[in-house]
Image (spheres, rainbow, N blue to C red):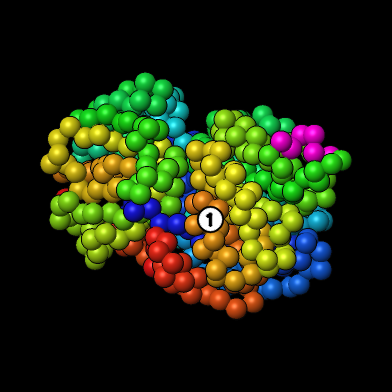
Amino acid sequence: MLAKRIIPCLDVASGRVVKGVNFVDLRDAGDPVEIARRYDEQGADEITFLDITASSDDRDLILHVIEEVAAQVFIPLTVGGGVRRVEDVRRLLNAGADKVSINTAAVHNPQLIADASGRYGAQCIVVAIDAKCADSGADAKGAASGWEVFTHGGRRPTGLDAVAWARRMQQLGAGEILLTSMDRDGTREGFDLALTRAVADAVDVPVIASGGVGNLAHLAQGIIEGGADAVLAASIFHFGEYTVRQAKEYMASRGIEVRL
Amino acid sequence: MTTIAVIDYGMGNLRSVSKALEHVAPQARVQVTSDPAAVAAADRVVFPGQGAMPDCMREMEARGLRPAVLAAAQAKPFLGICIGLQMLFESSDEGGVRGLGVLAGRVRRFAREAMHDKEGRRLKVPHMGWNQVRQRTAHPLWSGIDDDTRFYFVHSYYAEVEDQRIESGVSDYGLPFTCAVARDNIFAVQFHPEKSHTAGLRMLLNFVDWNP
Protein backbone atom coordinates (compact mmCIF):
# COMPACT_ATOMS: atom_id res chain seq x y z
CA MET A 1 0.00 0.00 0.00
CA LEU A 2 1.20 3.48 -0.84
CA ALA A 3 2.63 5.22 2.22
CA LYS A 4 1.61 8.71 3.29
CA ARG A 5 4.64 10.95 3.07
CA ILE A 6 6.35 13.15 5.63
CA ILE A 7 8.24 16.01 4.03
CA PRO A 8 10.51 18.25 6.08
CA CYS A 9 10.75 21.70 4.55
CA LEU A 10 13.83 23.87 4.63
CA ASP A 11 13.39 27.58 4.07
CA VAL A 12 16.66 28.72 2.56
CA ALA A 13 17.89 32.30 2.30
CA SER A 14 21.29 33.05 0.76
CA GLY A 15 22.32 29.43 1.14
CA ARG A 16 21.35 29.05 4.83
CA VAL A 17 18.31 27.42 6.40
CA VAL A 18 16.01 29.85 8.16
CA LYS A 19 12.49 29.63 9.49
CA GLY A 20 10.33 32.59 10.13
CA VAL A 21 7.10 32.95 12.00
CA ASN A 22 4.51 34.38 9.61
CA PHE A 23 7.35 35.08 7.19
CA VAL A 24 9.14 37.55 9.46
CA ASP A 25 11.63 37.18 12.32
CA LEU A 26 13.99 34.81 10.53
CA ARG A 27 16.06 32.60 12.77
CA ASP A 28 19.22 30.95 11.48
CA ALA A 29 18.79 27.18 11.69
CA GLY A 30 21.84 25.88 9.90
CA ASP A 31 23.55 24.41 6.89
CA PRO A 32 21.05 23.02 4.36
CA VAL A 33 23.24 20.15 3.22
CA GLU A 34 23.86 18.98 6.75
CA ILE A 35 20.19 19.29 7.69
CA ALA A 36 19.06 17.49 4.53
CA ARG A 37 21.42 14.63 5.33
CA ARG A 38 20.07 14.40 8.85
CA TYR A 39 16.46 14.21 7.63
CA ASP A 40 17.45 11.62 5.07
CA GLU A 41 19.01 9.47 7.79
CA GLN A 42 15.86 9.85 9.89
CA GLY A 43 13.75 8.48 7.05
CA ALA A 44 12.25 11.57 5.42
CA ASP A 45 10.23 10.57 2.35
CA GLU A 46 11.18 13.69 0.42
CA ILE A 47 12.76 17.03 1.22
CA THR A 48 11.46 20.41 0.09
CA PHE A 49 13.61 23.51 -0.19
CA LEU A 50 11.91 26.86 -0.34
CA ASP A 51 14.29 29.55 -1.50
CA ILE A 52 13.31 32.83 0.11
CA THR A 53 16.49 34.65 -0.82
CA ALA A 54 15.71 38.35 -1.14
CA SER A 55 18.89 39.53 -2.82
CA SER A 56 19.14 38.74 -6.52
CA ASP A 57 22.94 38.47 -6.11
CA ASP A 58 22.46 35.39 -3.95
CA ARG A 59 19.78 33.75 -6.09
CA ASP A 60 22.08 31.15 -7.60
CA LEU A 61 23.27 29.89 -4.21
CA ILE A 62 20.29 27.54 -4.13
CA LEU A 63 21.61 25.77 -7.22
CA HIS A 64 24.85 24.94 -5.43
CA VAL A 65 22.95 23.78 -2.38
CA ILE A 66 20.80 21.47 -4.51
CA GLU A 67 23.81 20.12 -6.40
CA GLU A 68 25.53 19.26 -3.16
CA VAL A 69 22.45 17.70 -1.57
CA ALA A 70 21.62 15.68 -4.71
CA ALA A 71 25.06 14.10 -4.67
CA GLN A 72 24.51 12.75 -1.17
CA VAL A 73 20.79 12.34 -0.58
CA PHE A 74 18.92 9.81 -2.72
CA ILE A 75 15.30 10.68 -2.08
CA PRO A 76 13.12 13.12 -4.04
CA LEU A 77 14.03 16.78 -3.70
CA THR A 78 11.60 19.61 -4.40
CA VAL A 79 12.70 23.19 -4.82
CA GLY A 80 10.53 26.28 -4.91
CA GLY A 81 10.87 30.03 -4.60
CA GLY A 82 11.41 32.58 -7.33
CA VAL A 83 10.59 30.22 -10.20
CA ARG A 84 9.28 32.47 -12.99
CA ARG A 85 10.18 30.91 -16.31
CA VAL A 86 10.56 27.47 -17.88
CA GLU A 87 14.28 28.25 -17.91
CA ASP A 88 14.25 28.46 -14.08
CA VAL A 89 12.62 25.02 -13.97
CA ARG A 90 15.31 23.61 -16.25
CA ARG A 91 18.14 25.03 -14.15
CA LEU A 92 16.74 23.57 -10.95
CA LEU A 93 16.14 20.16 -12.50
CA ASN A 94 19.66 20.17 -13.92
CA ALA A 95 21.05 21.04 -10.51
CA GLY A 96 19.43 17.87 -9.15
CA ALA A 97 15.89 18.83 -8.14
CA ASP A 98 13.27 16.20 -8.90
CA LYS A 99 10.33 18.54 -8.65
CA VAL A 100 9.97 22.29 -8.90
CA SER A 101 7.37 24.19 -6.98
CA ILE A 102 5.77 27.26 -8.55
CA ASN A 103 3.66 29.76 -6.67
CA THR A 104 3.38 33.47 -7.55
CA ALA A 105 4.41 32.98 -11.17
CA ALA A 106 1.54 30.54 -11.71
CA VAL A 107 -0.91 33.30 -10.75
CA HIS A 108 0.74 35.89 -12.99
CA ASN A 109 1.16 33.47 -15.88
CA PRO A 110 -0.85 30.24 -15.65
CA GLN A 111 0.52 29.22 -19.05
CA LEU A 112 3.89 28.68 -17.31
CA ILE A 113 2.42 25.57 -15.66
CA ALA A 114 1.25 24.19 -19.01
CA ASP A 115 4.60 24.98 -20.64
CA ALA A 116 6.74 23.56 -17.84
CA SER A 117 4.56 20.48 -17.47
CA GLY A 118 4.51 19.91 -21.22
CA ARG A 119 8.27 20.16 -21.38
CA TYR A 120 9.33 18.20 -18.30
CA GLY A 121 6.24 16.24 -17.31
CA ALA A 122 3.56 16.78 -14.69
CA GLN A 123 5.49 14.60 -12.23
CA CYS A 124 7.99 17.38 -11.60
CA ILE A 125 5.63 20.35 -11.49
CA VAL A 126 4.24 21.21 -8.07
CA VAL A 127 1.94 24.18 -7.73
CA ALA A 128 2.19 25.84 -4.35
CA ILE A 129 -0.96 27.57 -3.19
CA ASP A 130 -0.92 29.97 -0.27
CA ALA A 131 -4.50 30.32 0.92
CA LYS A 132 -6.21 32.46 3.52
CA CYS A 133 -9.69 32.29 4.89
CA ALA A 134 -11.60 35.02 3.05
CA ASP A 135 -13.32 37.63 5.19
CA SER A 136 -16.95 36.81 4.73
CA GLY A 137 -17.85 40.42 3.96
CA ALA A 138 -15.45 42.66 2.10
CA ASP A 139 -13.26 40.77 -0.34
CA ALA A 140 -14.81 37.34 -0.71
CA LYS A 141 -15.96 37.94 -4.25
CA GLY A 142 -13.54 35.55 -5.89
CA ALA A 143 -13.52 33.01 -3.11
CA ALA A 144 -16.65 30.91 -3.26
CA SER A 145 -15.09 28.11 -1.22
CA GLY A 146 -14.16 30.52 1.56
CA TRP A 147 -10.40 30.52 0.89
CA GLU A 148 -8.56 32.98 -1.28
CA VAL A 149 -5.19 32.56 -2.99
CA PHE A 150 -2.44 34.94 -1.86
CA THR A 151 0.95 35.58 -3.40
CA HIS A 152 4.22 37.20 -2.37
CA GLY A 153 4.56 35.18 0.81
CA GLY A 154 0.96 35.75 1.84
CA ARG A 155 0.98 39.52 1.48
CA ARG A 156 -0.94 40.01 -1.74
CA PRO A 157 -4.55 38.90 -2.30
CA THR A 158 -5.42 37.67 -5.78
CA GLY A 159 -9.21 37.41 -5.71
CA LEU A 160 -8.85 33.76 -6.79
CA ASP A 161 -10.76 31.00 -5.07
CA ALA A 162 -8.27 28.50 -3.65
CA VAL A 163 -10.25 25.35 -4.50
CA ALA A 164 -11.09 26.45 -8.04
CA TRP A 165 -7.48 27.49 -8.50
CA ALA A 166 -6.21 24.06 -7.44
CA ARG A 167 -8.52 22.44 -10.01
CA ARG A 168 -7.37 24.81 -12.72
CA MET A 169 -3.72 24.11 -11.92
CA GLN A 170 -4.33 20.38 -12.17
CA GLN A 171 -5.96 20.88 -15.58
CA LEU A 172 -2.98 22.90 -16.78
CA GLY A 173 -0.55 20.18 -15.75
CA ALA A 174 0.33 20.39 -12.06
CA GLY A 175 1.33 16.94 -10.81
CA GLU A 176 0.89 17.83 -7.17
CA ILE A 177 -0.49 20.65 -5.02
CA LEU A 178 1.43 22.06 -2.06
CA LEU A 179 -1.25 23.76 -0.01
CA THR A 180 -0.27 26.20 2.72
CA SER A 181 -2.70 27.87 5.07
CA MET A 182 -1.36 31.39 5.58
CA ASP A 183 -3.63 31.76 8.60
CA ARG A 184 -1.89 28.84 10.28
CA ASP A 185 1.66 29.10 8.97
CA GLY A 186 4.03 29.62 11.86
CA THR A 187 1.28 29.45 14.51
CA ARG A 188 1.84 25.81 15.58
CA GLU A 189 -1.95 25.43 15.93
CA GLY A 190 -2.26 22.67 13.33
CA PHE A 191 -3.28 22.58 9.68
CA ASP A 192 -6.41 24.29 8.43
CA LEU A 193 -8.13 20.92 8.08
CA ALA A 194 -11.26 22.21 6.34
CA LEU A 195 -9.13 23.89 3.69
CA THR A 196 -7.01 20.77 3.25
CA ARG A 197 -10.08 18.58 2.89
CA ALA A 198 -11.75 20.93 0.42
CA VAL A 199 -8.73 20.94 -1.88
CA ALA A 200 -7.87 17.25 -1.45
CA ASP A 201 -11.43 16.30 -2.44
CA ALA A 202 -11.43 18.67 -5.40
CA VAL A 203 -8.38 17.38 -7.28
CA ASP A 204 -7.13 14.01 -8.53
CA VAL A 205 -3.46 14.79 -7.97
CA PRO A 206 -1.79 14.39 -4.58
CA VAL A 207 -2.08 17.22 -2.05
CA ILE A 208 0.60 18.13 0.48
CA ALA A 209 -0.76 19.85 3.59
CA SER A 210 1.37 22.64 5.01
CA GLY A 211 1.26 25.44 7.55
CA GLY A 212 0.76 25.30 11.28
CA VAL A 213 2.23 22.02 12.48
CA GLY A 214 3.13 22.24 16.16
CA ASN A 215 3.05 18.61 17.22
CA LEU A 216 2.80 15.07 15.90
CA ALA A 217 -0.96 14.84 16.33
CA HIS A 218 -1.29 17.69 13.83
CA LEU A 219 0.55 15.63 11.21
CA ALA A 220 -1.85 12.72 11.67
CA GLN A 221 -4.86 15.05 11.49
CA GLY A 222 -3.67 16.36 8.13
CA ILE A 223 -3.88 12.85 6.73
CA ILE A 224 -6.91 11.47 8.56
CA GLU A 225 -9.14 14.54 8.73
CA GLY A 226 -7.63 16.68 6.00
CA GLY A 227 -7.35 13.86 3.48
CA ALA A 228 -3.84 14.93 2.48
CA ASP A 229 -1.47 12.53 0.73
CA ALA A 230 1.58 14.05 2.37
CA VAL A 231 2.33 16.43 5.23
CA LEU A 232 4.99 19.08 5.29
CA ALA A 233 6.56 20.62 8.36
CA ALA A 234 9.56 22.72 9.18
CA SER A 235 10.12 24.00 12.68
CA ILE A 236 9.13 20.87 14.63
CA PHE A 237 12.00 19.09 12.91
CA HIS A 238 14.58 21.89 12.71
CA PHE A 239 14.86 22.59 16.36
CA GLY A 240 15.10 18.96 17.33
CA GLU A 241 11.70 18.68 19.03
CA TYR A 242 10.89 15.58 17.04
CA THR A 243 12.75 13.44 14.57
CA VAL A 244 11.12 12.38 11.31
CA ARG A 245 11.32 8.83 12.63
CA GLN A 246 9.30 9.75 15.73
CA ALA A 247 6.73 11.43 13.52
CA LYS A 248 6.40 8.28 11.42
CA GLU A 249 6.14 6.01 14.43
CA TYR A 250 3.39 8.22 15.80
CA MET A 251 1.51 8.18 12.51
CA ALA A 252 1.84 4.40 12.29
CA SER A 253 0.38 4.17 15.80
CA ARG A 254 -2.64 6.09 14.47
CA GLY A 255 -3.12 3.50 11.74
CA ILE A 256 -1.55 5.54 8.95
CA GLU A 257 0.53 3.66 6.39
CA VAL A 258 4.08 5.04 6.50
CA ARG A 259 7.51 3.97 5.31
CA LEU A 260 9.51 2.99 8.37
CA MET B 1 37.09 0.61 -16.68
CA THR B 2 33.38 -0.15 -16.99
CA THR B 3 31.46 2.50 -18.85
CA ILE B 4 27.80 3.07 -18.15
CA ALA B 5 25.83 5.11 -20.65
CA VAL B 6 22.87 6.99 -19.21
CA ILE B 7 20.73 7.80 -22.21
CA ASP B 8 19.77 11.44 -22.49
CA TYR B 9 16.82 12.10 -24.74
CA GLY B 10 16.56 15.69 -23.61
CA MET B 11 13.57 15.57 -21.28
CA GLY B 12 13.96 14.84 -17.63
CA ASN B 13 16.32 15.04 -14.73
CA LEU B 14 19.20 12.71 -15.50
CA ARG B 15 21.45 14.10 -12.87
CA SER B 16 19.74 12.03 -10.19
CA VAL B 17 20.43 8.80 -12.05
CA SER B 18 24.03 9.62 -12.90
CA LYS B 19 24.77 10.87 -9.37
CA ALA B 20 23.35 7.71 -7.86
CA LEU B 21 25.38 5.50 -10.23
CA GLU B 22 28.54 7.48 -9.46
CA HIS B 23 27.80 7.06 -5.77
CA VAL B 24 27.51 3.26 -5.92
CA ALA B 25 30.19 2.70 -8.57
CA PRO B 26 32.95 5.26 -8.09
CA GLN B 27 35.27 3.11 -10.24
CA ALA B 28 32.93 3.19 -13.25
CA ARG B 29 32.74 5.85 -15.90
CA VAL B 30 29.19 7.18 -15.96
CA GLN B 31 28.38 9.05 -19.13
CA VAL B 32 25.15 10.94 -19.72
CA THR B 33 24.84 10.88 -23.47
CA SER B 34 22.59 11.31 -26.47
CA ASP B 35 25.29 10.09 -28.85
CA PRO B 36 24.36 6.74 -30.46
CA ALA B 37 28.06 5.88 -30.82
CA ALA B 38 28.64 6.36 -27.09
CA VAL B 39 25.66 4.12 -26.34
CA ALA B 40 27.06 1.50 -28.71
CA ALA B 41 30.48 1.69 -27.06
CA ALA B 42 29.25 1.49 -23.45
CA ASP B 43 29.45 -1.72 -21.41
CA ARG B 44 26.14 -1.08 -19.71
CA VAL B 45 23.17 1.06 -20.57
CA VAL B 46 20.66 2.80 -18.35
CA PHE B 47 17.55 4.27 -19.94
CA PRO B 48 15.94 6.56 -17.37
CA GLY B 49 12.77 8.34 -18.12
CA GLN B 50 10.45 11.02 -16.98
CA GLY B 51 7.65 12.89 -18.54
CA ALA B 52 5.53 11.41 -21.28
CA MET B 53 6.16 8.41 -23.50
CA PRO B 54 5.21 10.17 -26.80
CA ASP B 55 7.92 12.78 -26.12
CA CYS B 56 10.37 10.02 -25.27
CA MET B 57 9.75 8.15 -28.53
CA ARG B 58 9.86 11.34 -30.59
CA GLU B 59 13.11 12.55 -29.04
CA MET B 60 14.70 9.11 -29.32
CA GLU B 61 13.96 9.15 -33.06
CA ALA B 62 15.06 12.76 -33.50
CA ARG B 63 18.42 12.01 -31.95
CA GLY B 64 18.92 8.86 -33.98
CA LEU B 65 19.08 6.83 -30.77
CA ARG B 66 16.57 4.13 -31.64
CA PRO B 67 18.96 1.64 -33.32
CA ALA B 68 21.54 2.02 -30.53
CA VAL B 69 18.90 1.55 -27.82
CA LEU B 70 17.47 -1.51 -29.57
CA ALA B 71 20.94 -2.99 -29.98
CA ALA B 72 21.73 -2.37 -26.32
CA ALA B 73 18.45 -3.94 -25.23
CA GLN B 74 19.39 -7.06 -27.17
CA ALA B 75 22.97 -7.44 -26.02
CA LYS B 76 24.11 -5.52 -22.93
CA PRO B 77 23.10 -5.25 -19.32
CA PHE B 78 20.21 -2.86 -19.76
CA LEU B 79 18.32 -1.05 -17.03
CA GLY B 80 15.11 0.77 -17.88
CA ILE B 81 13.61 3.19 -15.37
CA CYS B 82 10.04 4.55 -15.45
CA ILE B 83 9.45 5.64 -19.08
CA GLY B 84 12.55 3.53 -19.75
CA LEU B 85 10.43 0.49 -18.82
CA GLN B 86 7.29 1.64 -20.63
CA MET B 87 9.02 2.35 -23.96
CA LEU B 88 10.21 -1.28 -24.18
CA PHE B 89 6.63 -2.43 -24.77
CA GLU B 90 4.62 -2.43 -27.99
CA SER B 91 2.40 0.56 -27.40
CA SER B 92 1.05 3.01 -24.86
CA ASP B 93 -2.37 4.50 -24.20
CA GLU B 94 -0.48 7.76 -23.67
CA GLY B 95 -0.94 9.52 -26.98
CA GLY B 96 -1.56 6.15 -28.65
CA VAL B 97 2.17 5.94 -29.28
CA ARG B 98 4.13 2.85 -30.36
CA GLY B 99 7.05 1.70 -28.26
CA LEU B 100 10.15 -0.26 -29.21
CA GLY B 101 8.26 -3.56 -29.00
CA VAL B 102 11.14 -5.38 -27.34
CA LEU B 103 8.66 -6.79 -24.81
CA ALA B 104 5.12 -7.97 -25.50
CA GLY B 105 2.38 -5.93 -23.89
CA ARG B 106 0.98 -2.45 -23.70
CA VAL B 107 1.12 0.51 -21.36
CA ARG B 108 -2.14 1.58 -19.76
CA ARG B 109 -3.34 4.48 -17.67
CA PHE B 110 -4.62 3.90 -14.15
CA ALA B 111 -8.38 3.89 -14.77
CA ARG B 112 -9.98 6.70 -12.79
CA GLU B 113 -13.04 4.63 -11.77
CA ALA B 114 -10.87 1.81 -10.37
CA MET B 115 -8.81 4.08 -8.16
CA HIS B 116 -10.01 3.17 -4.71
CA ASP B 117 -8.30 1.37 -1.85
CA LYS B 118 -9.82 -1.49 0.13
CA GLU B 119 -11.64 0.94 2.42
CA GLY B 120 -13.12 2.73 -0.57
CA ARG B 121 -10.96 5.84 -0.25
CA ARG B 122 -10.04 7.55 -3.49
CA LEU B 123 -6.52 7.01 -4.79
CA LYS B 124 -4.80 9.90 -6.50
CA VAL B 125 -3.15 9.77 -9.92
CA PRO B 126 -0.20 10.10 -10.43
CA HIS B 127 0.73 7.24 -8.13
CA MET B 128 3.31 9.21 -6.21
CA GLY B 129 5.34 8.08 -3.24
CA TRP B 130 6.75 5.00 -1.56
CA ASN B 131 5.04 1.71 -2.27
CA GLN B 132 5.88 -1.91 -1.53
CA VAL B 133 7.28 -4.17 -4.21
CA ARG B 134 6.67 -7.91 -4.17
CA GLN B 135 9.41 -9.83 -5.87
CA ARG B 136 7.97 -12.41 -8.24
CA THR B 137 11.21 -13.98 -9.38
CA ALA B 138 14.65 -14.32 -7.90
CA HIS B 139 16.98 -12.05 -9.82
CA PRO B 140 20.50 -10.69 -9.27
CA LEU B 141 19.05 -7.16 -9.18
CA TRP B 142 16.97 -8.05 -6.09
CA SER B 143 20.05 -9.28 -4.28
CA GLY B 144 20.19 -7.93 -0.72
CA ILE B 145 16.76 -6.30 -1.04
CA ASP B 146 13.95 -7.66 1.13
CA ASP B 147 10.65 -8.67 -0.37
CA ASP B 148 8.01 -5.92 0.11
CA THR B 149 10.62 -3.19 0.35
CA ARG B 150 9.27 0.25 -0.50
CA PHE B 151 10.50 2.10 -3.57
CA TYR B 152 9.66 5.59 -4.81
CA PHE B 153 7.12 5.77 -7.63
CA VAL B 154 5.76 8.61 -9.68
CA HIS B 155 3.69 7.65 -12.71
CA SER B 156 0.19 7.57 -14.18
CA TYR B 157 0.74 4.67 -16.59
CA TYR B 158 1.84 1.08 -16.04
CA ALA B 159 2.81 -1.85 -18.26
CA GLU B 160 0.38 -4.67 -18.84
CA VAL B 161 2.63 -7.60 -19.75
CA GLU B 162 1.50 -10.35 -22.11
CA ASP B 163 4.02 -12.92 -20.96
CA GLN B 164 3.74 -13.33 -17.18
CA ARG B 165 7.14 -14.98 -17.11
CA ILE B 166 8.89 -11.64 -17.50
CA GLU B 167 7.14 -10.18 -14.46
CA SER B 168 9.76 -9.76 -11.74
CA GLY B 169 8.04 -7.33 -9.37
CA VAL B 170 4.47 -6.34 -8.54
CA SER B 171 3.00 -3.43 -6.64
CA ASP B 172 -0.57 -2.57 -5.65
CA TYR B 173 -2.34 0.66 -6.46
CA GLY B 174 -6.03 0.15 -7.00
CA LEU B 175 -4.98 -3.04 -8.77
CA PRO B 176 -1.87 -5.19 -8.77
CA PHE B 177 0.43 -3.96 -11.54
CA THR B 178 3.77 -5.07 -12.93
CA CYS B 179 6.49 -2.76 -11.62
CA ALA B 180 9.58 -4.75 -12.60
CA VAL B 181 10.29 -6.90 -15.63
CA ALA B 182 13.26 -9.12 -16.36
CA ARG B 183 14.27 -10.97 -19.50
CA ASP B 184 17.77 -12.04 -20.43
CA ASN B 185 19.95 -8.90 -20.30
CA ILE B 186 17.03 -6.55 -19.62
CA PHE B 187 15.81 -5.42 -16.24
CA ALA B 188 13.34 -2.58 -16.08
CA VAL B 189 11.45 -0.94 -13.25
CA GLN B 190 8.54 1.46 -13.02
CA PHE B 191 9.85 2.98 -9.77
CA HIS B 192 12.90 5.18 -9.37
CA PRO B 193 15.82 3.35 -7.76
CA GLU B 194 17.88 6.54 -7.93
CA LYS B 195 15.37 8.14 -5.54
CA SER B 196 14.69 5.10 -3.37
CA HIS B 197 17.31 5.54 -0.70
CA THR B 198 19.24 2.47 0.48
CA ALA B 199 17.23 -0.15 -1.41
CA GLY B 200 17.40 1.82 -4.63
CA LEU B 201 21.14 2.32 -4.36
CA ARG B 202 21.51 -1.39 -3.72
CA MET B 203 19.59 -2.16 -6.90
CA LEU B 204 21.86 0.15 -8.89
CA LEU B 205 24.92 -1.50 -7.36
CA ASN B 206 23.46 -4.89 -8.27
CA PHE B 207 23.04 -3.65 -11.83
CA VAL B 208 26.66 -2.50 -12.03
CA ASP B 209 27.79 -5.95 -10.82
CA TRP B 210 25.32 -7.91 -12.98
CA ASN B 211 26.67 -10.19 -15.71
CA PRO B 212 23.69 -11.75 -17.50
Where residue B34 sits: x, y (%)?
A: 43, 37
Q: Residue at x 22, y 30 (%)?
A: B105
A129 vs A156, left or right, is left
| Residue B42 visible in rendering | no
| Total numbered labels placed on residues in the image | 1
Dominant SS in magenta: loop
Residue at left 42%, top 43%? B122
How far across and how far down the image is residue A11, in percent? 68, 62
Q: Furthest-right residue in view?
A: A138
Residue with the most extreme bottom position:
A240
**Residue B30: x, y in percent?**
40, 52
Q: Quadrant of the N terminus of chain B?
A: bottom left
Location of residue A111 with respect to B153 vertically, above or below: above
Q: Chain of mark 1?
A: A
Magenta part of the chain? A139-144
Residue at x 66%, y 59% (from the top left corner): A211
Q: Which residue is mark 1?
A: A225
Find out whether residue B86 is within the magenta segment: no
Please identify the quarter of the rendering in which residue A184 is found: bottom right
